[in-house]
Image: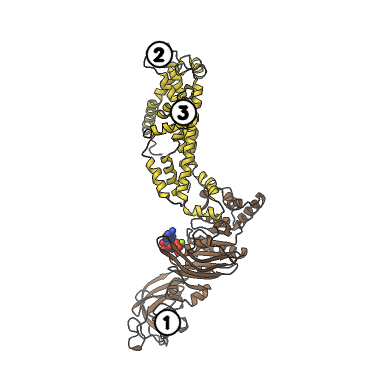
Chain colours: A yellow, B brown
Amino acid sequence: MIGSSSTRTFIAHAVLLLGILIVAFPIYYTFVASTHTLQTILRPPLPLLPGGEFWNNYSEALTGGVNRIGGVGVDVLLLNTTVMALGIAVGKICISILSAYAIVFFRFPLRMVFFWLIFITLMLPVEVRILPTYKVMVDLGLIDTYAGLIVPLIASATATLLFRQFFMTIPGELVEAARVDGAGPWRFFFDILLPLSRTNIAALFVILFIYGWTQYLWPLLVTNHNDMNTIVIALRKMVSFADADTQWHLVMVTAMLAIVPPILVVVAMQRWFVRGLVESEK
Amino acid sequence: MATVDLKDVKKVYAGGIEAVKGVSIAIPDKELCVLVGPSGCGKSTLLRMIAGLEAISSGTVSIDGKVVNEISPTDRDIAMVFQNYALYPHMKVYDNMAYGLRNRGTPKAEIDSRVRSTAKVLELDHLLDRRPRELSGGQRQRVAMGRAIVRNPKVFLFDEPLSNLDAKLRGQMRVEIKNLQRSLGVTSVYVTHDQLEAMTLADILVVMNAGLVEQMGAPLDIYEKPASTFVASFIGAPPMNLMALGRDGGQPHLADGAKLGVEPPAAATTLGFRPEDALVLPPDAKQGGFVLPAVVEAVEPVGAESFLHCAAAGSRILVRVSGRATAKPGDKLAVAANSDKIHWFDASGKRV
Ligand SMILES: Nc1ncnc2c1ncn2[C@@H]1O[C@H](COP(=O)(O)OP(=O)(O)OP(=O)(O)O)[C@@H](O)[C@H]1O
Ligand SMILES: [Mg+2]
């Protein structure tokens, strides 16, 4: 450890605590607000300690339905968002790992053309191609479906490039050893490439899950029915311009519930991250 | 049980690089063939063509009498040991060894008994649950060997398998590989650029240079009768002393004009003798035959032997003396060689 003197330790801890405070206080305050009645919230100042309305607020939000978003419970929103975020994360990983596999390990005509095509799409974010994509989704009848939420976001040039970079570090000898050992392309992929990529996959999964979870523009366009909304969209709909119309206590509950799943994913995957960093494969 | 036959095998890489320019080798059953040569001469390329990892541009490779040009590495029934071992980093030693058998649908019980008995032979039994990164270089090398042996293939292919080990371990493994290969009786091709490995392991030694076979045969035959100056300076450590002959006025002489004392064959333009065949005599020795006055420039004591770097007849020569050398730099002496230990080469470098 660098510098074990007590002042240094003290300073290090002070900085860390300050950081935690800056990050955590707004979240704590949201939590506090989610445990008070609407009246308490609307009459500043808001207390710094949690109130007694925890069960009431949370059960109302989860099961009672929220008026402004058509009586849909937050449970439905959570389900929708989870399906979408998982679909995007898993889909992106599957597609990008397979594309990278093809580009790195197979020789086929126009290989570099395909590579550059993928590369160029990096410059075309969802927003740029949103109208044609919307048209296609309408024609396919995918408005207000999970497929409509997930499929247009599923291709990922970034993830493909990341996997490509990683695959290029795999020594040719390893590929050849597998061929001599009788592993065909699929076996090589599942038995060797996939296990070697697992820390990359874990890292990407976290990033992509959160990317999917926080999507705003696309879900806003492609869902019309309230029961297909994602939690981020619903949160926006719950907030009205007139303060009095807004059920702030339920907004706070929804906000709290919206950040729980990403936190769970990060915490669950953290062990993989750390393992991947500590025991780098040779 | 297999023979390996190469007939006029050529390899042209994309871009027109001719890596192998027509090589024919016949390896009898159970014999170990060593390919040796300087870096870039096409040894690995040739080996990889036998393995099926590299397409054959022309010529044929046959294993057990069957042409395998179009057969995939998987179906050639070969096993390969790579220079960097190429162990699967995420698999335990056991699974590394079992993987090839599993892919071939070997029954579980048989896989288990084969892996365990191979591990025992290689003294890996206590390491079966480790992953490659938890092993030393030597242990990884053994696992790579084990992975090849356990499959019981027709042919073993080795691409510089010992080049990442330290000198002592290399010597140990060399003996072990030879013993294993002999006791298993598997036809093998072994690539190295270490001439000591080449000499000690080979049943058939193939010396390659620039994509062609320079000489092929039993290692000691090659040592005693190198077919060219290239082979003479490549096989044997330290390399053979080579001295150019001048011939103006019909009388052959050395670079500084000194007489030879022996009659060279008519076509000879280069004379060679090995450091270990050189005899050291006192400077005033009166003796017929090939004797050169020499001045010691440096002495390298190795322990069991010493090497004298000398200047003689306008060139540098190396002389081996056994035990501790009494000569010091600056000493004058005479270097002689028996006429049957002298090699002659013509202008194109061929033996005459
Ligand atoms: N994939 C390739 N594409 C083009 N040229 C290649 C390729 N692989 C090897 N070569 C060339 O072929 C020649 C022979 O290469 P090879 O790897 O067989 O040499 P080597 O005898 O094994 O050398 P070393 O002892 O350094 O391993 C070299 O000139 C090399 O540059
Ligand atoms: Mg090589």
Does residue A188 sit above or below B155 in this rendering? Answer: above
Q: Residue furthest right?
A: B109
Mark 1–mark 3 CB contact (< 8 Å): no
Give the CA distance from mark 2 to mark 1. Answer: 112 Å
Front-most of residues B268 and A123: A123
Asked if residue B291 shows in the view, the reply is yes
Q: Earlier in the sequence, mark 2 or mark 3?
A: 3
Q: Which residue is at a point 39% across and 15% down the rendered structure image?
A: A46
Residue B231 found in image quarter: bottom left
Note whether ligand 1 is within 8 Å of mark 3. no
In depth, the one of A150 and B103 nearer the eye is A150
Question: Do the residues marked 1 and 3 share a common chain?
Answer: no
- Whether residue B79 sits left or right of residue B310 in the image: it is right
Q: Residue B74 appears in which quarter of the rendering?
A: bottom right
Whole-number angstrom distance, CA of label 2 to CA of label 3: 29 Å
Q: Which residue is mark 3?
A: A143
2 or 1: mark nearer the eye: 2
Locate residue B33: give its quadrant. Answer: bottom right
Please name the residue that numbered disc 2 is placed on.
A245
In this picture, is B159 found above or below A217? below
Residue type highlighted by circle 3: Ile
